[in-house]
Amino acid sequence: MKVSIEINGTTVSEEVEDRTLLVHFVREQAGLTATNIGCDTTSCGACTVLLDGESVKSCTVLAAQADGHSVTTLEGLHGEDGDLHPVQRAFREEHGLQCGFCTPGMIMASVSLLDHNPKPTRQEVRAGLEGNLCRCTGYHNIVNAVMNASGQEVQR
Amino acid sequence: MSIVGTRVVRIEDQQLITQGGTYVEDLRVEALTGAVHAMFVRSPIAHARIASIDTSAALEAPGVVAVYTAADIDLAPHKAGPVVEPWLADGVVRYVGEPVALVLTEERYQLADAAELVDIDYDPLDVVASIDSALSDETVLFEDQGTNVLQTTGGEFDDKSFDDCEVVVTQTILNQRVAPAPLEVRGAACAWGEDGRLTLWLSTQNAQISRSTVAKGLGVESKDVRVITPDVGGGFGAKIGSDPEAVVLGWASKRSGRPVRWVETRSENLVSMTHGRAQQNRVTIGGRRDGTVLAFRLEVVQDAGAYPRTMFLPTLTELMGTGVYHFPKVETSSRAVVTNTTPIAAYRGAGRPEATAAIERAMDLFAAEIGMDPAEVRRVNFIRPEEFPYSSPTGATYDTGEYAKALDKVLEAGGYADLRAEQARRREAGDPVALGLGIAAYVEITGGDSGGESGRLLINPDGSVTAYTGSSPHGQGLDTTLTMLLSDQLGVPMDKITIRHGDTDEVPKAIGTFGSRSLQLGGSALRQAADQVIEQARALAADRLEASPDDIELSEGAFQVRGAPTSGSVTWAQLAEQAELTADVWFGDGAPTFPFGAHLAVVEVDTLTGKVELKRIIACDDAGPIVNPLAFQGQRHGGLGQGAAQALLEVMNYDADGNPTTATLADYSFITATELPDFELVDSETPTTRNLLGVKGIGEAATIGSTPAVHNAVVDALSHLGVRHLDMPTTPLRVWQALTDARKAN
């Protein structure tokens, strides 16, 4: 079937198998490889993207379901002039990443979290990111990154 | 002012936060054009004879290029310890997840369809699914061995060892099997060039060891294999070197004449990537009622899994068995057994967490028995600062340590006395939410392989620096740390320094990253290389400035005559244009170092439901001078999280038939952000004399301390209700069961 999805402002139209997952469409058809696959049970959140502005785990969405909709991935977050999104900047400043594999999903989930709750408490950040797993950071600095991005105090 | 010791954000991050990393699966290089996709067909049962394999239906499936089985593989077999581990299962399968066949297809989505059509007929055999079952030898995995016990050390114990003790406590402590589960699963891509060389892109911690293993497996020369490490999404010890799959893929690429891409699924990763820990340790501790421990015995049984790929784990546990204590009498032994489970290998700490968990639980058991505060018992038995270097009775020589100071720091930072008072108040009031305090004091060994590391440095004609390291970071931030060190030493700005690693053509000789060795050995190698380059430059500068080399000093990236700055200076670029400035060193004299620390964990346990909540964790981790506090703290945070997770949640479980019951992330309990508190870090820096930088490793330290701290805290919370010990993970069910048993017993 033919699927057309606006990804980071550009429409990608490709003929794909009906069963093609959105994450594979993004990675293979659109060639955007920041979005990662970390599990096969929708548990890890590494594949989180924004679908019409809402965070979804793109391994649990069929490309067909996103047909005609818009998707934002990590690559589409920063400005064309290279200006980082506040969440990207905060992840770097707070050392919110180590190996970087969970990071694209973690950043997209954080963007969505702050969209819904611009001034979260640390506990709200932890609850908001429960669906995104990180094996490196112990989450402490990820929480700091979200607090930083929301203009709040961090705990270094 | 020196940049070393200041908090510097990572140079690695720009790419990772804008475009993501380039992990194996992201590679879009020309050499992989037209690559086929690969999937291993893995055994669904733990122990069986393979009666037949029919690949005909799979070969007919859409897009299938080839299906290979053991019958096709014409490579010499390889050994795992004393036994042969086939490349693909040959006649018998010995664990769920063992590779039996390899399917190659044109498209990724065709893989699972085709793999499902490989028809394998299994005749089940009796299963050895536990250490106890292995020790009984009722069923033997490898007939030619005659037993499941494939390695034994020590064990000639003195019957009188504990005769002088007023109190003796014995306990069997399970250090449960866990899955390293890096977020990026295993992956590889490979292609043979027209020159007859194999290029293998591999998600590994050490390209050079992988190159040697793969070349040996394929029966070719090392020079005929090039291994490239792209970004690696976590390793945690389980990506040391290469697994047999890498050899099979290289072979399949040659046989099929096609480049090959492979990435496993998560459920495949959880049953076929090596697991960690999996020890059953029996401790006997005895001493006087004043807190002095007189004798300690540690009996280690390592579950090696189906193929004993790594046998150093139980002996490393013995080596570190006495921890931070000076005991007059020490006895250890170890056995390694094979079972019908996934092979065991290194996992963050590899042998040391098991040692620390055993001795730190033992100290608490002893303290409880004599009715003394666990902190006080530790103070009585610590190795004292004046005893260093300390030769332990198990054969380790500790370099430096301030064990009592580390413990005092965390107890003070945590408000230990107040916490104990709060605990007493709750107990008095019959509060169903019990407070538990857990202490662990630890020492660990880093760079324990003593193998050295390579470093090569080149000053480019424009004055920029390219450094090649044999270390191979995968999230530790080593690029930034090494850049800081070189910037400081050479006076060259960080943005003019490039660190290269992980390509065996660029760095032919190296050992890589494991055992927290990278900074102390890899960093020292680059320090030495830079020293040599500076000497070369001083000689050149002396010539140009018409002075003696001894009078030439390097200041802010330029060479000048000491005490005479007005007589002119010469820059790195000017010197590099004049002559080649380069050094290639092997830092080989790096003896192991012994980081240490103390952790205090505070938990709340709901005694009605068994729910455990980790409220606080206060950590002092001393690994010598800190180069970049940002990376240093990051390593500690990660270690604390992973270590606490083992105490609280994580376990790789099997049923009695050897079926893994935690084979997806829906079942395997990764710790999430909601289950961890904010970490409270206390700093301490005790340098070592054993390398040029005075540094010790930090990658595993916090993992080692946090597991027993949290474990001890949970038991402490329940101690007033009659619970003396419970095994990890301290899940609500296990806690509730322990409380129920204790109530019945009372």
Image: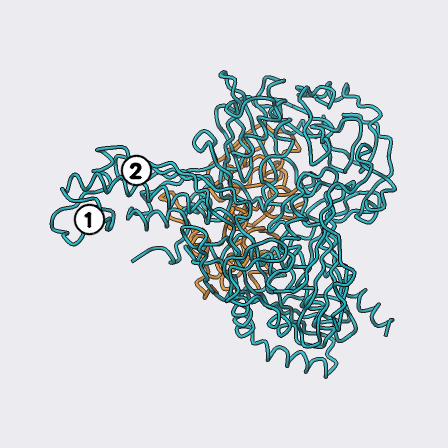
- Residue that carries the numbered disc 2 in the rendered image: B459
Task: In the rendered view, tell whether residue B535 sits above or below residue B43.
Answer: below
Q: Amino acid at mark 2?
A: Ile
* Circle nearer the viewer, 2 or 1: 1
**Chain B palette colour:** cyan
Question: Which label belongs to residue B330?
Answer: none
| Render colour scheme | by chain
Chain the render paints orange: A
Q: Quadrant of residue B268?
A: top right
Tell me how far mark 2 sits from mark 1, CA to CA.
22 Å
Which residue has dot 1 on it?
B551
Q: Chain of mark 1?
A: B
The front one of A78 and B543 is B543
Local secondary structure at mark 1: helix
Apparent side of residue B339 relative to residue B291 in the rendered image (left or right) = right
Number of callouts: 2
Q: Residue B91 in the image: x percent, y percent?
A: 80, 26
